[in-house]
Image: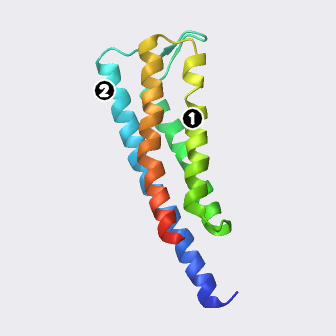
Amino acid sequence: MSTAASGSTARRLLGVAAAGLLATIATMVAVVGAAALAKAVGVDFEIPDDGEVIPLGGFATVTGFFCLLGVVLAVALSRWSPHPSRWFIRTTVVLTAASLVPPFLAGADAGTTATLVALHLIAAAVVIPVLAVRLRVAD
């Protein structure tokens, strides 16, 4: 691989990673904001199986962690896939659908369950399009 080609690849990967990090921050803000709003209107976020209440900081931590995994996926697909945007969208749609199952299994009340599902969809709606567009540019 030539130096110019490797430089171009490095810039592309850095661009995907930078867009992903910004999207991660935006997603964390959106999810925590929506969770705070839900809490303000009476959603308790109590998981009765273990009596725990999900704290707002927990939403930030988990959202950030899984968004960063998405960024790693996007960077890997950008590096090794001939069609990174297509594969990223397919993979993340399946993963988002799978993420909607646990709220129904946690034993929480309907308000908490519905809010958790909505928060998963908010996160997906913020981070997936940003990375998909960035990957399309990298295609």
Q: Residue at x 61, y 33 (%)?
A: 98
* Residue 64, placed above or below residue 49: below
* Residue 48, placed above or below residue 58: above
Q: Position of residue 20 (x, y in %)?
A: 49, 57
Q: Residue furthest right?
A: 1
Q: Amino acid at mark 2?
A: Leu
Q: Is residue 115 left or right of residue 79?
A: left
The part of the image, by quadrant, that contains residue 99 is top right
Q: Residue at x 43, y 31 (%)?
A: 119
Q: Is residue 43 left or right of residue 75?
A: left
* Residue 70, placed above or below residue 121: below
What secondary structure is marked by label 1? helix
Quarter the N terminus occupies: bottom right
Q: Amino acid at mark 1?
A: Ala
Q: Residue at x 53, y 73 (%)?
A: 12
Name the residue nearer the viewer: 9 or 54. 9
Tell me if residue 69 can be seen. Answer: no
Q: Position of residue 91 (x, y in %)?
A: 61, 48
Quarter the C terminus occupies: bottom right
Q: Position of residue 24 (x, y in %)?
A: 46, 49
> Viewer-nearest of labels 1 and 2?
1
Q: Position of residue 70 (x, y in %)?
A: 57, 50
Residue where numbered disc 2 is placed: 37
Q: Categorize mark 1 by other alpha carbons within 10 Å: few (<14), some (14-19), many (20+).
A: few
Mark 1 and mark 2 residues within 8 Å of each other at the beta carbon? no
Residue where numbered disc 1 is placed: 97
**Pointer 1 or 2: first along the chain:** 2
